[in-house]
Amino acid sequence: MDLRSLRYFIAVVEAGSLSRAAGSLYIAQPALTAQIKKLESELGAQLLERSHAGVTPTQAGVQLYQDARRLLSDASAMRERIQRLPQGPEGSVTIAVPFLLSSLLMGPLLAHLKDTHPRIRVFVLDDLSLMVRKAMLDRRADIGVLVDAAQVEGLHCRPLVREAMYFCGHDPGGTVRALLRSAPDAAATAQAPAARRAGARATAARAASPTMRPTIDFADAAAQPLVLQSRRYTIRQRVEEAAAARGVALNIAHEHDSARVIRSLYACGGGFTFTPACALGDAPASSTDWMVARVVNPEMTRSYTLATAADREVDGVMQVVMDALEAVVRELVASGRWEAAV
């Protein structure tokens, strides 16, 4: 006895005729009759009374009809429950990410996860790099993107991406532009055949030091009026290290801890600043005197690591989010939207 046999029996009882039931089921009447006889044989009871007017259920047939209706209804409900079960991982993950990186990375990441894993909920803590590390150590975040932290006690870290540092600001008089050097291979790239140009563009998109950007010597940059955060922060620390390596002094015009205050100052022409590649998109719109150059001598870079708690196993939901994050980073770099190297 199977569900199909019971469905056939119900159709016969409700039609009151084997021929009418066969028509509604789109099967031949002899085949339907054989199914009913097989069902009666399996149950050891006569289920239908046959007459010239059609068929009517016996007492056993009435009981089977009621039970079969209930059974088929339960089977349908079971199918719907199974189909409504979550498909794929489901859960929530909190990511801590540096403030300067969040505007570039988090939009594409969240949109990607919404399309591929809609049952995963992602919460974002975007803050200064110091607070990102603290959020991971305090267990307030499941996944962290750390700045210049190859290893941190209590965390498992693996390299994610590396980018160059740039010098930028308003230069209405062109004083700083006069100090810039053109990219050494820019002219050659412009004259190269189409295939070579395409290869050069792909290489530049993957490189932490894009060849098409002009450069500025660190000593020349350090002499300009600077807008910087205090020594607690990683960008300032890299600037201080470069100044010590070159034996030059920093011309600091403004020092503030707030990244928003720093941005407001250099955006209004209050001085120049050092910024990572991920924040180049924050440049003021439609400004003809805005200047961006890659810092060299020494070249300054900024690295990111993907971190999780060392004593916590990465579950399926976390793994999905980490894989998606790495895929988005690769796509941003490959497309040239992020001047970095994976």
Image (spheres, rainbow, N blue to C red):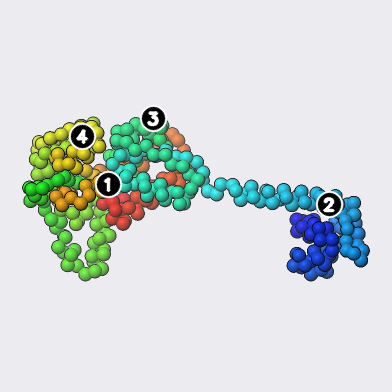
Could you tell me residue 121's position as x and y percent? Answer: 46, 42
User: Residue 7 — which label?
Assistant: none
Residue position for label 3:
138
The tag earlier along the polypeptide, 1 or 4, is: 4
Tell me the kind of residue under disc 4.
Gln
Local packing at callout 1 (Cα closer than 10 Å; few below 14, some 14-19, many 20+) is many
Instruction: Tell me the quarter of the picture where residue 303 sits.
Output: top left
Q: Residue at x 18, y 38 (%)?
A: 265
The tag earlier along the polypeptide, 2 or 4, is: 2
- Secondary structure under badge 4? loop
Q: Residue at x 48, y 48 (%)?
A: 118
Could you tell me residue 224's position as x and y percent? Answer: 10, 41
Q: Tags 3 and 2 in contact by the CB under 8 Å rule?
A: no
Q: Tags 1 and 2 in contact by the CB under 8 Å rule?
A: no
Tell me the kind of residue under disc 3.
Asp
Nearer the observer: mark 4 or 3; the answer is 4
- Secondary structure under badge 2? helix
Nearer the observer: mark 2 or 4; the answer is 2
Tell me the kind of residue under disc 2.
Leu
Residue position for label 1:
278
Tell me the kind of residue under disc 1.
Cys
Residue position for label 4:
229
Cα distance between the residues tagged 4 and 3: 24 Å
Residue 104 shows up from this direction: yes
Residue position for label 2:
64
